Structures are given as structure tokens and as C-alpha cells.
Amino acid sequence: MISISNKKLDAWIKEVADMCQPDEVYLCDGTKEEYQKMLDIMVEAGLGTPLNPEKRPGCYLFRSHPSDVARAEKRTFIASKNKEDAGPTNNWIDPDELKKSMTELYTGCMKGRTMYVIPFSMGPIGSPISKIGVEITDSPYVVFNMYIMTRIGTAVLGALGEDGEFVKCLHSVGQPLGPGEVDKEWPCIPNVDEKYISHFPEERMIWSIGSGYGGNALLGKKCFALRIAGVQARDEGWLAEHMLILKLTNPKGESYYVCGAFPSACGKTNLAMLQPSFPGWKVETIGDDIAWMKFGEDGRLYAINPESGFFGVVPGTSMQSNPNAMTQIQKNTIFTNVGLTDDGDVWWEGSGIPAPDHLIDWKGNDWTPDSGTPAAHANARFTTPAAQCPVIAPEWEDPAGVPISAILVGGRRKTTIPLVNESVDWNHGIFLGSIMGSEITTADITDKVGQVRRDPFAMLPFMGYHMGDYLQHWLDIGKKTDACKLPRIYFVNWFRKNEEGKFIWPGYGENSRVLKWIVDRLSGDAEVVNTPIGNLPTLDGIDLNGINIGEAEMTELLKIDKEAWLAEIESIKENYKSYGDRLPKELAEELAKLEAKLA
Ligand code: GTP
Ligand code: SPV
Ligand code: MN
């Protein structure tokens, strides 16, 4: 058994090993050699494929079990001591009860496997904004993904010291092996109802079993950096958010840092590394999924990207939509659930590359363009080092973080929500963040198709506590500094559709036109129209030079449909009711103000 100078960690490892009964315990040192060794283990077991080194050096393909392809939201639990503290948006189980039933599942669950101990830092090691976690897992896939996504290994143990605090992250695929037995396919518990992704917020602990995929298994990401860190942030006066961070520099050479909260699969990775449409403007990337923000000594909010890699949606990524990502994933990248071509490369829908006549699809079957099924799963992902992003900002690992000037919020809305709307003050901005959401689509398997699911700050699946308290926390943050030092909040919507059901706004790189308007606002160079819902651009405010958008489209994109907004208010009231007496009074006031202005 390994021995570690941090007493709590040493005891926890022994406790977990006693419960899970692995054949071996291995402490990860975080070296490149170790990373390669983990990949080799999977390849030798037949569970992964090295790609053609001439086409994609250092790249590998993995296929998950078809039942294990995305986050399992209905199996995600917030086991706070009191049910009310989990709030109306979370699944709750009593923590003692949950520990009891999960202990049964964990008992002997690592038989025949190695138990890997991964010390990791969310954020640059030693930054005052960073935090340490330790993930215990029986999946080498998790180890090499954590190597890319976080900073792992011996240096983290050094930073932890003998009595440092860490978040306990326990993960198992939940598939013990009998003597001599080996994995024949991606190990997991195929029955979704037997998977658990559990959070014990008061104990700062995560217990996950049964899934090997994404946010269910890479516990530094959504489980720690959003759900548990969200609780720490509330208690300690900072923010842990589902946001990209980008740096925008105008032709005058002035740089602004902007965060953006968009729900999953709504464009964070794309926006974070877009190529602006205007000469002289530059976008650089700090992060593509998560932002931790703390006040600096100057009273401004500073953000770090707690991750060190991007776990991005593959389908739809092309030279047209995201050329920088295409370059980034050319080497040293893990692909999960895309198609494998006959020449050892990968292919996916929306790549802009014609489909080959034959490939092996994400389920491992022969595939041709006539197969009628997708070659890549819709939630196929790349795991790729942030440092490889062609437009990564030089300061992306600055332990001090970067000062945030603007925050974008927005979901997928076909109607009602304009292309961009500037909040008039902080509380109004938090109101806009609280009402963001997306129309429910047929993919959601419910009878609520067409209704709006409110997803405040894109945090609905990632809340570690009561949503009402969370919104109150945002409001309180605004009271901690001078109003002029707070970022301005912008409600954006790239997804408005015309009567034929087509997107009116071209999106992707063209979103830089909206970013440009926002920066012009920040530097005092753009006018606004004051409306009941907020400050909108003038009709000619957004530069449309070089794209096929005329005044008619712009009018539609900026239209405020009074009837639609009145219906929106009713739907917001309905949603606000679910917060009960934890609905912040400031938000009730904002809603009343909006209603009065529209009347
Ligand atoms: P997560 O990693 O799940 O948090 O997603 P994300 O927010 O990073 O989303 P991503 O950038 O990967 O985009 C997801 C999907 O949205 C892709 O299929 C894109 O093609 C599509 N998308 C991104 N930006 C735009 C846009 O500006 N307009 C339109 N119409 N689609 C977009
Ligand atoms: C998301 O769903 O928002 C993701 C992917 O970024 S996962 O890490 O699986 O949560
Ligand atoms: Mn995400």
C-alpha cells in the first residue's frame, strides 16, 4: 500500500481500498510516460485505437458503451443534509441513506482492477483561486483524460502538503472482474437506473459509479468545478460558473475579457475560439467551459479557467464553424464515439469533409453513407490540451486570473429574445441570467415540447444547492464592490429562427459582430435604444459589412414582440414560483418592473 504525508488523504485511500477491494493501488505521478502507459493499457485490452500517426499524431479513438454516452442528469444527486437545501431543480436523497446503498455497490466493485489515485488541481497549481481534488478511479480512460483536463500528479501532492484540504472524488465503472476475466468492451453499468453521480456538498465529496463518460466520470469537471465548487463559492464569496472566457482586442489595441454562460451544446467552445470577421480585431481563448471568479484587490472580478483541456462536442466542428478547434485536434487528442476511417483517421457529421464510402461507426459497426444512422454519436467528444489551442491567450494560466468586463448569458430561443440586449444594471443583469433558457425539443422525451426550460446562467444541471439561493448569491456579489467595477451583463441569442424555421443570424465566427458591439459599448463608442427589456443596439449598430443580413432581418433580430413578452412574463412567474420563499425579492421586483414597463 502507498503512503502519503497528508494524513486525511492517506486515511481516505485506505478506507476506499478496503471498500472497493482493488487488486492494486497506484498513485499517479502525472508524467507524460504515465499518460502513455494508461493509453497503452486500453489499447492492449482492445478498448482503444491509435489513429494514423501521419494524419493525427498522438491521437486515439475510444468507443463507449452505447448506454454510456452523456451525462446522466436523472441519476445526478445533491445529497445535502436538508432536502430544501438541494432546491427544486435537483434530485435529492438523504445522504446517510445514499451512502448506505452506494457502499453496497462500491463493496468489492474494483475486484480484478487497479485503483488509480489522481491528485489534481483545478486551476494553476498554487493560484489563490485554485483548489485541489483527489480522484480515485478504476478507469485508465479517466486517468488519461484527467491528465489532459486538469493538472495532476506529484506537484499537486506537494501543494496539498501535510494538512491541506481536498475534495474527495470517488469513481468506479462498477464492473468488478472475476479471476482471469478481462474487459471485452467499455466497462460500465449499462442500466442507467443503477448509475449514481452523487454529491455530498457539506462534506465536499463526490461519489460516482456506473458510468465512464465525460462529466459522470471526469469528476474535476462538472461535479467538482461547478456543483461542489459552487457551494464553496457561495460560502467563500466567489463564483463558480458554466462559462467560457475569451479575450477580445480591438484595433486600438485595447483588450477586454468576456465570460459567457450558454447551456451545454449551445456554443461556448465555438465562441471561445472564434475567428473575428473584422480586420484588426483579435479573439484569444482563456477557457471554453468553466470560469471561477473572485474579487481582486482593485474590486474587479478576476476569472481563471480551472481546467487545462477542452472536452468539446465533435459533430459540427469544421473548418467553417471552428477552424481553430480543427487545428487543435490534429494531434495529442482523445476522440470518443466518432467514426474510424479505413486509413486510420476519424470522421464525423458536420466536419465539412465528404463522408468516406466506408468506415467503422461509433458503435463499432461497418458504416456507409447509406447506413441511415450517424457515424458519430451526437455527443461524441474530443479531449485536447488547452495549450494546443492556436489562439490560446498567453495569460491563460495567470494565477491572478483576468479582469472580466462583460458577461454574456443566453440559451437557444427561436423567438422573443433579441440578438443582444444590454442590462441596465447588475440586478437587471441577474434577472436576465435567471430567465435564460431553451425551448424543449423532441430530443428531451417529454410532453413539454416547445415550452421554455429556464436554465439560469446555464447552471440547471450543475447546481450544488438551491437555485433561489444561487441567484441571491449573484445579487449579493453585486453589493460587494462599486457598481462601475462590475462586469456588464448581456443577454444574447444566436438562435432566433424565421418562419421557414431557418436561423436568421449566421452565428459562429459572425458572433464577433455582436462582441464588437459589446466592446464598443464598453469603450463608449456605441449608442443604444432604451426599451422595456433593456438596452438594444440601434438598427445600424451592429456592423453587417460583408454578410447577407439586411435591415429586415436586423429588425426581426431586434424586435420586441409585446404579446410574446407578456406570455414570457407568465412563464417566468410560473418558474419563479418553484423557488418558493427563496426567490430573491430583487428578482420579483425586476419582474414587476418589466411588467409595468410593457403595459
Ligand atoms: P458543452 O461542451 O456541452 O458545454 O457545449 P458548448 O456550449 O461548448 O457548445 P459547442 O460550442 O460545442 O457547440 C455545440 C453545438 O452548437 C454545435 O453543434 C455547434 O454547431 C452549435 N453552435 C455553436 N455556435 C453556434 C452559433 O453561433 N449558431 C448556431 N446556429 N449554432 C451554433
Ligand atoms: C456539458 O455537458 O456541458 C459538457 C460535457 O461540457 S460534460 O463534461 O460531460 O458535462
Ligand atoms: Mn459544458
Image (cartoon, rainbow, N blue to C red):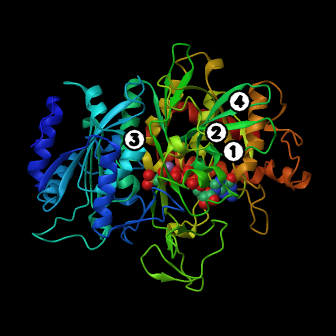
Q: Which amino acid does label 3 sit on?
A: Thr
Which residue carries the number 1 mark? 492
Which residue carries the number 4 mark? 424
> Between 363 and 35, which is closer to the camera in this rendering?
35
Q: Quadrant of the C terminus?
A: top right
Instruction: Confirm or reject: label 2 Cβ below 8 Å from ligand 1.
Output: no
Q: Residue 150 carries which label?
A: 3
Q: Is residue 559 depicted above or below 195 in this figure? A: above
Which mark is in front, 3 or 1?
A: 3
Q: Which amino acid does label 1 sit on?
A: Val
Which is nearer the N-term, disc 3 or disc 1?
3
Badge 4 density bin: few <14, some 14–19, many ≥20, Cα 10 Å: some
> Between 35 and 567, which is closer to the camera in this rendering?
35
Which mark is in front, 2 or 3?
A: 3
Which mark is in front, 3 or 4?
A: 3
Q: Residue at x 81, y 41 (%)?
A: 278
